[in-house]
Amino acid sequence: MDRTSRAALLAAFLGFATVAGLGAFLGFELGGALVAGAVTGLVAGLLIWAAARRAETFHEATPPSPRFPGAPDRSDGTPSDPTDPAAGVDDAR
């Protein structure tokens, strides 16, 4: 069982126990409290599971933009700004 399944089961159990337990403690009808707890637990577990599945689609890095961090080099291989000290070219002034 992976972490996602464990987290979804834990969320489902905690949602069920909290709502059903609180409903029973406050004196609501036991059947209604159990049904409300089951629905809450199911929704909580599904939300965790769906969020984890959605997050798996973001594992690929975004390709770099051609404009970042600076302009691309010229076709002859020299930097686009020869006086830029960050480009590693000494200023000849």
Image (tube, rainbow, N blue to C red):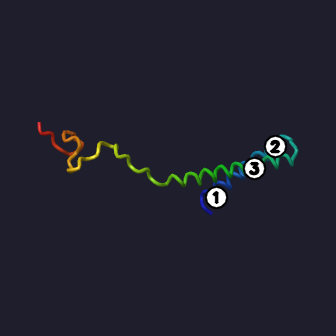
Q: How many marks?
A: 3
What residue do we see at 76% from left, 49% from top?
39
* Nearer to us: label 2 or label 1: 1
Q: Is residue 41 left or right of residue 48?
A: right
Name which residue type carries label 1: Ser
Q: Earlier in the sequence, mark 3 or mark 1?
A: 1
Q: Position of residue 40 (x, y in %)?
A: 74, 47
The foreground one among 84 and 21 is: 84
Name which residue type carries label 2: Gly
What residue do we see at 37% from left, 46% from top?
65
The C terminus lies in quadrant: top left
Name the disc covering residue 5, or none.
1
Q: Label 2 crowding class (10 Å Cα cut-off): few <14, some 14-19, many 20+? A: some
What residue do we see at 60% from left, 50% from top?
51
Measured Cα–Cα span from mark 3 to mark 1: 16 Å
What SS does tag 2 mark? helix
The N terminus lies in quadrant: bottom right
Name which residue type carries label 3: Phe
Give the residue pinned by disc 2: 23
Give the residue pinned by disc 3: 16
Residues at discs 2 and 1 in contact (Cβ within 8 Å): no
What SS does tag 3 mark? helix
